[in-house]
Image: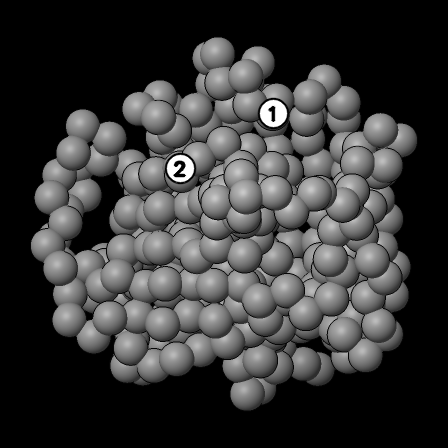
């Protein structure tokens, strides 16, 4: 799997919840990643939503032979940010770290209170950087939420808002700028229990699609043979493919949660199952001023 997939692809399905809060909402969810019938990864997520702030932590671990074949061992993502009086979010700190193909890595983004990117730190091996060079992103496009804050935007979608409404989000991950669009079917479908998850019921199919605005990967030119043209679709970068999620109301109709997902990767499609979810609500303590 491509190391860029988890934050902006596989992770996209993780959570979708209501949009206004008079309390602290804590959501703990576990997802299983299935590739070619094998359980290749498990993601543990913790989301906290407050009236004035948000945070989301994701801990992903590869399993069994998949660690050797797919190159990854463990991945972690974390973000926290502010929420203004109109419900708009502004990320303040984003970080991803882990072990990939035997090499530790870390990437971090920090923002000022206006949402302007102040710093981007990338600690990667020289070999990885040489293989994953990208074209520069114009200053005008170096704005937007980080990949994990995109999840928070989806999490905070109001239950009362029509699910079929088109939505788009600007995302900048420090190297590339994207426009993510989301479209959901108005009519739900029945999701049945499986050996991967006991969760079932009516769910809406939603399609999420990224459009790369800037930061295209720099690669070697490939001769345009008939074979190349024939395989052009198969070789299409995963970042340009769609992510499909099936979203269901849970917790008594309070939250939209993806209970299934189909995520593209360079190694083939990955199926994702919500295997457990725990939600907690705590009243916000009032502030006292002397």
Provide residue 21's location: percent of width, then percent of height: 43, 74
Q: Residue at x 48, y 54 (%)?
A: 241
**Which residue corresponds to mark 2?**
270
Residue 214 lies in quadrant: bottom right
**Which residue corresponds to mark 1?**
72
Q: What element carries label 1?
A: strand
Mark 1 crowd level (few <14, some 14–19, many ≥20, 10 Å Cα): many
Given residues 216 and 258, the one toward you in this image is: 216
Mark 2 crowd level (few <14, some 14–19, many ≥20, 10 Å Cα): many
Residue 14 shown left or right of residue 238 in the figure = left
Residue 182 lies in quadrant: bottom left
Given residues 226 and 1, the one toward you in this image is: 226
Q: Which of marks 2 and 1 is nearer the N terminus?
A: 1
In the depicted structure, whether residue 95 falls above or below residue 178: above
* In the image, farthest residue toward the bottom: 86
Q: Residue at x 19, y 59 (%)?
A: 203
Q: Quarter of the image for the C terminus: give it.
A: bottom right
Q: Which residue is drawn at 76% across and 74% down?
A: 141
Q: Which of marks 2 and 1 is in front?
A: 2
Given residues 263 and 279, the one toward you in this image is: 263
Provide residue 74's location: percent of width, then percent of height: 60, 27
């Amino acid at each position: 799997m491509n190391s860029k997939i988890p934050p902006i692809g596989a992770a996209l399905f993780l959570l979708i919840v209501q949009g206004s809060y008079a309390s602290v909402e804590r959501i703990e969810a576990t997802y299983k990643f299935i590739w070619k019938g094998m359980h290749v990864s498990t993601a543990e997520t913790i989301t906290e939503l407050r009236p004035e702030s948000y945070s989301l932590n994701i801990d992903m671990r590869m399993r069994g032979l998949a660690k050797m074949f797919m190159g990854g061992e463990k991945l972690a993502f974390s973000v926290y940010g502010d929420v203004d009086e109109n419900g708009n979010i502004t990320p303040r700190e984003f970080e991803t770290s882990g072990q990939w193909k035997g090499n530790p890595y870390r990437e971090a983004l920090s923002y000022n209170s206006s949402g302007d990117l102040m710093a981007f730190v990338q600690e990667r091996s020289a070999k990885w950087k040489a293989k994953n060079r990208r074209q520069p992103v114009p200053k005008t496009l170096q704005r937007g939420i980080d990949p994990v804050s995109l999840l928070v935007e989806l999490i905070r979608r109001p239950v009362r808002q029509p699910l079929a409404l088109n939505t788009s989000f600007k995302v900048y991950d420090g190297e590339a700028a994207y426009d993510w669009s989301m479209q959901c079917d108005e009519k739900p479908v029945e999701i049945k229990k499986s050996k991967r998850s006991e969760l079932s019921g009516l769910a809406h199919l939603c399609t999420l699609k990224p459009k790369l605005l800037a930061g295209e990967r720099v690669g070697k030119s490939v001769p345009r043979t008939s074979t190349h043209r024939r395989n052009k679709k198969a070789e299409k970068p995963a970042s340009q493919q769609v992510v499909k999620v099936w979203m269901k109301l849970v917790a008594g109709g309070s939250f939209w949660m993806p209970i299934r997902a189909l995520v593209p990767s360079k190694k083939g499609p990955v199926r994702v199952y919500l295997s457990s979810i725990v939600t907690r609500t705590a009243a916000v303590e009032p502030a006292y001023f002397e």
